[in-house]
Structures are given as C-alpha cells and as structure tokens.
Amino acid sequence: MSAIDNDGESGWRGSKELWLDAAYQVLLESGIDNVRILTLAKMLKLSRTSFYWFFKDRDALLDALLQLWQEKNTTALLRQAGTDAQSLSEATLNLFDCWLDRAVFDSSFEHAVRSWGVQSPAVAQALNEADATRLEAIRSMFIRHGCEPLLADVRSRALYLTQIGYISLNTNEDVTTRMQRVPSYVAIFSGTLPSARELEQFHQRHSYRHYS
C-alpha cells in the first residue's frame, strides 16, 4: 500500500503504514499514553474516521505497534546471533552490531516498549517472552563456539542484560567511547580478545554510524 491512498468520496485517508508510523513516532517522543487516535489524526492532518479504515480501534493499533517491535528488534537480534563466524569473538562482534546500528536494532523503540511494559501486563509478558527467546539465541551462539552450557548461559545473560541495562537507563554514550570499550566488552563476555582483523571489519561496518 502506498503511503497515501485517495478515496474519491472520503478524501485522503492515509494508510495503515502511515498511521502505524505516526504511532511509533509518538511512542518514542512522548510515551504510550499519548498514542491516541485524535493525537495521530491531528499529527497527520487526517480525520479521525480515516483511522477506522485501517484499525478496528486503538487496541488494534497498539497490538500492531507491539508486533512491529517484535518483528524488528527480536528478529534482528536472532539474525545477528545466528550469523556465521569463525570465532566466538567474531560472533560476539556480530551481535554488537545491534548496539551500534539503529537500522539493525532500534534501541529507542526498545526503551519505549520497556517503559510501556511497566504499566501494561500484556506488554510485560511480551517482553518476558522476547527476553527468553533472545537469551536462548545468544546462549546457543556461545554453545556453537565451544562453551559448555552453564558457562554459555552465564555469558549470554551477562552480555544481554548489560545491554538491556544500557537501554533501560537510556544511557547516552558517544560512538568513539563505545568503540574504545568494545574490545574489552568482547573479552569480558566471550573470554577472548577480538583479533585485529575482526576489529577492523567491525569498525568498517560502523565507520559512519552514530550510537544512540
């Protein structure tokens, strides 16, 4: 569906994607309580009735917003954890792409959903399920590279929960500082320092990125 659909009788209605993107923007900027149909209609300069061409009600929009988060962030983390690597340190750096590139893993979206989960049991449950799925993927990554199960479990928790702590606290860290810390983080989480080649490849992937 295109960004804007035109109906000859009713005028501009927007699209499902347009309403959902507006909800995403409001969620990030001012929280879930402000994701309201009237607010979005004013933001998009569309009528409230246009909304109902694409969503049954506000709850349906919120469900779609949560699904978008699940598809974007959890899918990305699982993909990165499963990426082929020649060493555990390289595999860990592949996972670190999530923390450096918002196009891979949207940390702002993650923070907003975790804040939302504080007041919504259903969202809190979705977060718990996502955390379990992500942790299992990281644990499996460590096991594939030779870690015994208990050590893999501890390392996966240390890595993942540290980053979720960064996100939940809305920590700001400039990209230069983060890059300087990456080798030590990899050593702590994987038990081995990344090689010069691995670090060079990692830096090349993020040369023009800005951490947020």
Image: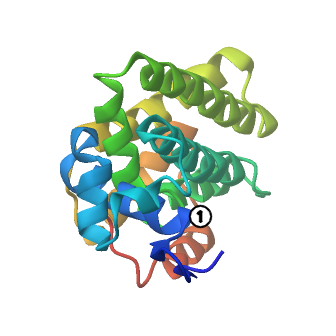
Q: Amino acid at mark 1?
A: Ser
The foreground one among 119 and 193 is 119
* Quadrant where the image shows the C terminus: bottom left
Q: What is the x, y in percent for residue 168?
A: 28, 37
Q: Is residue 89 above or below residue 7?
A: above
The foreground one among 24 and 168 is 24
Quadrant housing residue 93: bottom right
The foreground one among 4 and 107 is 4
Residue 101 is at least partly visible in this image: no
Picture residue at 67% right of the left edge, 29% below the top: 139
- Colour setup of the view: rainbow
Picture residue at 33% right of the left edge, 74% below the top: 210
Q: What is the x, y in percent for residue 62?
A: 45, 40
Residue 31 is at least partly visible in this image: yes
* Quadrant where the image shows the N terminus: bottom right
Q: Is residue 11 above or below residue 178?
A: below
Q: What is the x, y in percent for residue 28?
A: 28, 54
Residue 163 lies left or right of residue 201; in this view the side is: left
Picture residue at 55% right of the left edge, 57% below the top: 53
